[in-house]
């Protein structure tokens, strides 16, 4: 009875030891990877333009690195809407976005769909005659599409 208890504790301790080793191995691998990536970043940032006269003293390099980099103004006011940091929409923004309607032509079916906001397809109300005309053109477009897919395109 006593030997069974010792065996179970031994197996649990070996399992625990194996888990710890595995965890330590993962951690070491992660640190190595982050160290390598930070070293790559350091190499890229240490590459600075050298003066044209050939002197590459440490003071000159430090002076070049200390100078502010010139570039475009990146204030939030000048950024286009698509580039600005995303945050939750206000109710007004959401309503404005949802009220925009656009017509999109589907070349496969030959239908023009009315789409609202992010992609909700709306039903467009048309007269009976217009509905029949739309169905005729859509049927022709369907036939043409399937002919091209199946390779049955007839030359007229």
Image (tube, rainbow, N blue to C red):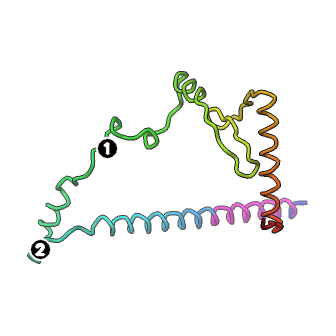
Q: Earlier in the sequence, mark 2 or mark 1?
A: 2
* Closer-to-camera residue (11/101): 101
* Closer-to-camera residue (133/15): 133
Disc 2 to disc 1, C-alpha distance: 31 Å
Q: Is residue 45 magenta?
A: no
* Residue 97 pos. (x, y %): 56, 29
Q: Residue at x 70, y 51 (%)?
A: 107
Tag of residue 52: 2
Q: Is residue 42 left or right of residue 22?
A: left
Q: Secondary structure at mark 1?
A: loop
**Residue of label 1:** 74
Looking at the figure, which quarter contains the N terminus? Answer: bottom right
* Residue 64 pos. (x, y %): 16, 62
In the image, residue 97 sits, relative to residue 133, either above or below, namely: above
Q: Is residue 11 magenta?
A: yes
Q: Secondary structure at mark 2?
A: loop
Q: Quadrant of residue 153?
A: bottom right
Q: Residue at x 58, y 30 (%)?
A: 100
Q: Residue furthest left?
A: 53
* Closer-to-camera residue (115/60): 115
Mark 2: few, some, or many residues within 10 Å (few <14, many ≥20)? few
The magenta region covers 4-22
Q: Quadrant of residue 136?
A: top right
In the image, residue 85 sits, relative to residue 7, either above or below, namely: above
* Residue 96 pos. (x, y %): 54, 25
């Amino acid at each position: 009875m006593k030997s069974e208890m010792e065996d179970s504790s031994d197996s649990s301790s070996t399992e625990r030891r194996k888990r710890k080793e595995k965890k330590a191995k993962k951690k070491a691998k992660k640190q190595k990877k982050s160290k390598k990536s930070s070293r790559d970043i350091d190499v890229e940032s240490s590459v600075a333009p050298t003066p044209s006269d050939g002197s590459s003293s440490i003071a000159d390099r430090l002076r070049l690195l200390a100078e502010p980099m010139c570039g475009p103004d990146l204030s939030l006011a000048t950024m286009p809407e698509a580039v600005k940091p995303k945050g939750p929409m206000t109710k007004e923004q959401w309503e404005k976005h949802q009220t925009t309607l656009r017509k999109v032509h589907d070349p496969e079916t030959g239908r023009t769909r009315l789409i609202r906001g992010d992609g909700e397809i709306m039903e467009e109300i048309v007269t009976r005659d217009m509905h029949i005309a739309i169905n005729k053109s859509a049927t022709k477009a369907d036939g043409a599409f399937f002919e091209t897919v199946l390779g049955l395109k007839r030359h007229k």
